[in-house]
Amino acid sequence: MKWQQQKSLATREKVLRAALVCLERDGFHHLSLVRVASEAEVSKGALTHHFSSKDELITLAMEVLLDEFVQTLRASVDDVHAGRVSLDECLDGIWHFMSGQLYMVTLEIALKARHEAAFKSALTPLVQHFHAQLNDIWIRLFPDLTPERAQVLMNLTMNLLRGMGTQSVFREDPSYFNELLDTWKNILDQQLPRGKDHKY
């Protein structure tokens, strides 16, 4: 790859990361291309060379964040099957990821999409692709369950964690959330088959 191409990709990556930082820290209402450019330490002209609008920038930044979560979850499922981590540890990792930047950014974007049909329409294929990947990963995590049952458990898990993420805005109490997560681990455990070949 030529040096100029490498520089362009590096600039693009810096801007996307900066957009996520600004969105998490400041919220969508206060987000601006000028603020993102400042966070990325690039000129506004360099930013607009890569991204034509704030909506495009945020959509692509969200795609990066979702892809990272998918890759992290895939690796965690591989670790479960290899016996390197337990299912409980896998769930801890999901909560750690979702209780940070991922959830807060998702919340900001969801609120914007609720009121802006065009933005929602542009974002919907990305969200649908994300959930399709989650379904595939969860089915792989629980091969002894029917795909339908695995998806139900996945949706229950994700919705619980999203709810916990929302409540964490108003309640900073790690022990409280750990208790909720531990309770869900026990409930989930009761839904799974047992046998010598299972590594949950």
Image: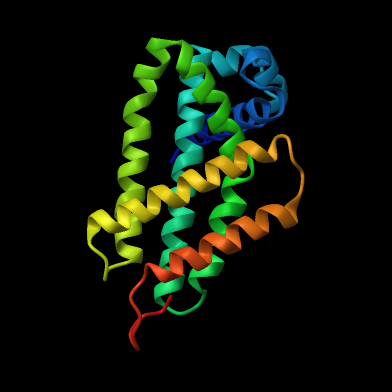
- The color scheme shown is rainbow
Left or right placement of residue 180 versus residue 169 in this view: left
Indicate the quadrant containing the C terminus: top left, top right, bottom left or bottom right.
bottom left
**From what the image shows, is residue 49 above or below residue 89?**
above
Q: Residue at 37% of width from left, 67% of height from top?
A: 191
x then y, percent, for residue 192: 36, 71
Q: Residue at 46% of width from left, 71% of height from top?
A: 79
**From what the image shows, is residue 151 above or below residue 51?**
below
Residue 17 in view: yes
Picture quarter containing residue 143?
bottom left
Q: Residue at 35% of width from left, 26% of height from top?
A: 124
x then y, percent, for residue 128: 32, 35
In this view, the residue farthest toward the right is: 172
Question: Which of the pair 55/41 is nearer the observer?
Answer: 55
Picture quarter containing residue 123?
top left
x then y, percent, for residue 150: 31, 58
x then y, percent, for residue 104: 61, 34
Indicate the quadrant containing the N terminus: top left, top right, bottom left or bottom right.
top left
Question: Which of the pair 21/195 is nearer the observer?
Answer: 195
Q: For the image shown, how many numbered marks are present on the structure?
A: 0
Q: Residue at 47% of width from left, 44% of height from top?
A: 159
**From what the image shows, is residue 106 above or below residue 117?**
below
**From what the image shows, is residue 187 above or below residue 161?**
below
Left or right placement of residue 41 versus residue 166 in this view: right
Residue 16 in view: no
